[in-house]
Image (spheres, rainbow, N blue to C red):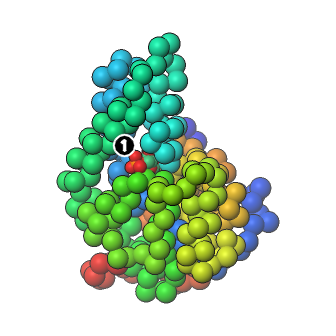
Amino acid sequence: MKPPAQPWSVASENAGASRPPYAAVIFDLDGVLVDTAEYHYLAWKRIADEIGVPFDRRKNERLRGVPRGRSLEILIEDMPRPPADLETLAERKNRWYVEMIGRLTPADLLPGAERLLLALKRGKIRMAVGSSSKNARAVLERVGLANAFDAIVDGYGFERAKPAPDIFLNAAQLLDATPAQCVVVEDASAGIQAAKAAGMFAVGVARDEPLPGADLLVRSVAEIPLSLWGLPEEDHSSHRERP
Ligand code: BG6
Ligand code: MG
């Protein structure tokens, strides 16, 4: 695997994209702020084992950022005889997932997330969540971020999911920001494509797999430079309040 580029390295093909400082940020949720991507995987794995279809973390990468129904289609794509009641399977997967996120606490925020959110809030940067998940609000509630954002756009009410730009364009509108003023932070290939289709600056959080198309690659949100928004890097160690 190719290691992620150094933070703040802008991909050459995007060199003509808009420039910092940006005025707003739109965070994907699962796998960016909270490690719920693992719970999605575990719940799908349980379904896969039950119906006898091979499924591993590599295949799971294709499910990142993808809505529930489409995820199930990908899961069963190689089955000679796909199960009849897909809706029931998707519902069952969701029940397990909901059970798992019921145990989330603020301690489940990914490293650097709280610090970054606090610094952006202090810098008066407009902040949104743009997630494909219908459980996004429940997750935000559990980790104590229900009131941390100026706008939340979740998996309800969108005909065109990521990689279409709709979720991010809607979030930008709610933030009263133009696409060129927005940074998107994403861990999924579908999300990076959506951000670029929306005309936004895309930060890719790439832990294990490469994430093509991102303007800037980091290993975690802790590496995202505040200079993107024209803010000074600060020593956050003394700040304890929640965003
Ligand atoms: C995305 C996840 O955020 O939400 C996907 O990355 C998931 O893995 C999708 O399938 C839909 O989530 P939910 O909670 O509506 O099933
Ligand atoms: Mg994600």
Which residue ends up furthest to the left in the rendered image? 103
Percent of width and height locating residue 217: 57, 56
Whether residue 150 sits left or right of residue 190 in the image: it is: left
Q: Is residue 182 left or right of residue 240?
A: right
Amino acid type, callout 1:
His
Mark 1 Cβ and ligand 1 under 8 Å apart: yes
Can see residue 174? yes
For the N terminus, give its image quadrant: top right
Residue in the picture at 70% in, 57% down: 197
Bin the neighbour count of mark 1 within 10 Å (Cα to Cα): few under 14, some 14-19, many 20 and up: many
Q: Secondary structure at mark 1?
A: helix
Picture coordinates of residue 51 (x, y %)?
A: 35, 20
Q: Residue at x 32, y 43 (%)?
A: 94
Residue 196 spot, x, y in % from top left? 68, 58
Q: Is residue 8 above or below residue 176?
A: above
Of 131 and 116, which appears nearest the observer?
131
The residue identified by callout 1 is 40
Quadrant where the C terminus sits is bottom left
Q: Residue at x 52, y 80 (%)?
A: 126
Counting the numbered discs, the total is 1
Residue 129: where, in percent of width, then height? 47, 66
Which residue appears farthest toward the right when viewing the image?
A: 16
Depth check, front residue: 117 or 101 = 101
Side of 37 where 167 appears, left or right: right
208 vs 171, nearest the viewer: 171
Q: Is residue 227 visible?
A: no
Q: Is 227 situated above or below 223?
A: below
Query: What is the residue that sits farthest to the top in this orientation?
Result: 80
| Residue beneath the point at 46% across and 57% down | 156
Q: Quadrant of residue 136?
A: bottom left
